[in-house]
């Protein structure tokens, strides 16, 4: 069976106005510049694709071990993180820090994609093109959609010293996950898809339309129905 990445790379070629930036540049990357992966819709949309290839299942334990060492916390037997945090003066902050530690790869991907999209706009002289980061989650089952959404929100809220958003090049993120599934009924399971709009909300209506279109066509490409659950999110059922 083909991987999620292989299927998405076949699927993206079916979108209107598809162009591979690798093919356009023929492997000759301009010096000092990064670039995204694809252009679609007559260069109105720049897409950077990234895959979550490893499952950071050991990260929560590492966070707890470090915390216990720093604060002299004694832990006996098996206890939950909530039990550990509840005995501390800052349980909410500790939980937030652990989630971000778990999902550190998300901010790394956001930061890299920001440079790639910005440089691609310059290379092709398309300053008004929509910037989309597509995250393909095939293996990181511990990175649930709520964890990814929080990590994206935290990353996109960060600001430079000037007060401007640090990662402003991309207008939104689409997360396609097959690392875990959700039960819709006794006999039906679904793979979640998440869309996230940058807080700068530039071209918010356009990105919503594009995300909806991509979700519907991705479900059709996989011969599966699309079950919409709430604004900005959906599940492709199996």
Image: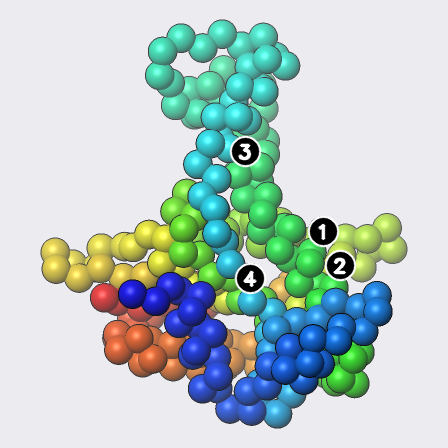
**Could you say which disc has been placed on residue 98 in the image?**
3
Instruction: Calculate the distance from the C-alpha at mark 2 to the C-alpha at mark 3.
Output: 24 Å
Q: Callout 1: 10 Å neighbours few (<14), some, many (20+)?
A: few
Whichever of callouts 3 and 1 sits on the residue coming sooner in the sequence is 3
Task: Report which residue position mark 4 lands on.
Answer: 50
Q: Nearer the viewer, mark 1 or mark 4?
A: 4
Q: Is residue 24 left or right of residue 61?
A: right
Whichever of callouts 2 and 3 sits on the residue coming sooner in the sequence is 3
Q: Which residue: 16% across, 58% down? A: 185
Task: Report which residue position mark 2 lands on.
Answer: 165
Q: Is residue 128 left or right of residue 37?
A: right
- Residue 15 percent across, percent down from the top left: 48, 86
Q: Which residue: 40% across, 56% down? A: 138
Let me know if residue 202 appears in the view. Answer: no
Let me know if residue 138 appears in the view. Answer: yes
- The N terminus appears in which quarter of the rendering? bottom left
- Residue 125 percent across, percent down from the top left: 79, 85
Q: Callout 2: 10 Å neighbours few (<14), some, many (20+)?
A: some
Q: Which residue: 42% across, 20% down? A: 83
Q: Are marks 1 and 2 in contact (CB under 8 Å)?
A: yes
């Amino acid at each position: 069976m083909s991987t999620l990445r292989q299927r998405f790379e076949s699927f993206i070629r079916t979108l209107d106005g598809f162009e591979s930036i690798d093919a356009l540049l023929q492997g000759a990357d301009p010096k000092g510049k990064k670039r995204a992966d694809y252009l679609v819709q007559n260069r109105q949309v720049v897409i950077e694709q990234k895959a979550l290839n490893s499952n950071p299942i050991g990260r929560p334990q590492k966070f707890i071990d470090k915390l216990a060492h720093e604060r002299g916390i004694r832990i006996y037997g098996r206890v939950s993180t909530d039990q550990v945090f509840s005995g501390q003066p800052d349980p909410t902050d500790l939980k937030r820090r652990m989630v971000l530690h778990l999902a550190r790869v998300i901010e790394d991907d956001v930061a890299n994609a920001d440079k790639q999209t910005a440089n691609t706009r310059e290379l092709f002289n398309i300053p008004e093109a929509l910037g989309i980061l597509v995250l393909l989650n095939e293996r990181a089952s511990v990175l649930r959609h709520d964890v990814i959404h929080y990590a994206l929100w935290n990353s996109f809220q960060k600001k430079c010293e000037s007060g401007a958003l640090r990662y402003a090049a991309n207008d939104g993120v689409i997360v396609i996950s097959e690392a875990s599934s959700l039960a819709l009924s006794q006999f039906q399971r679904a793979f979640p898809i998440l869309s996230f709009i940058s807080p700068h909300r530039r071209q918010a209506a356009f990105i919503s339309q594009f995300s909806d279109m991509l979700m519907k066509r991705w479900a059709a490409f996989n011969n599966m129905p699309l079950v919409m659950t709430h604004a900005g999110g959906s599940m492709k059922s199996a």
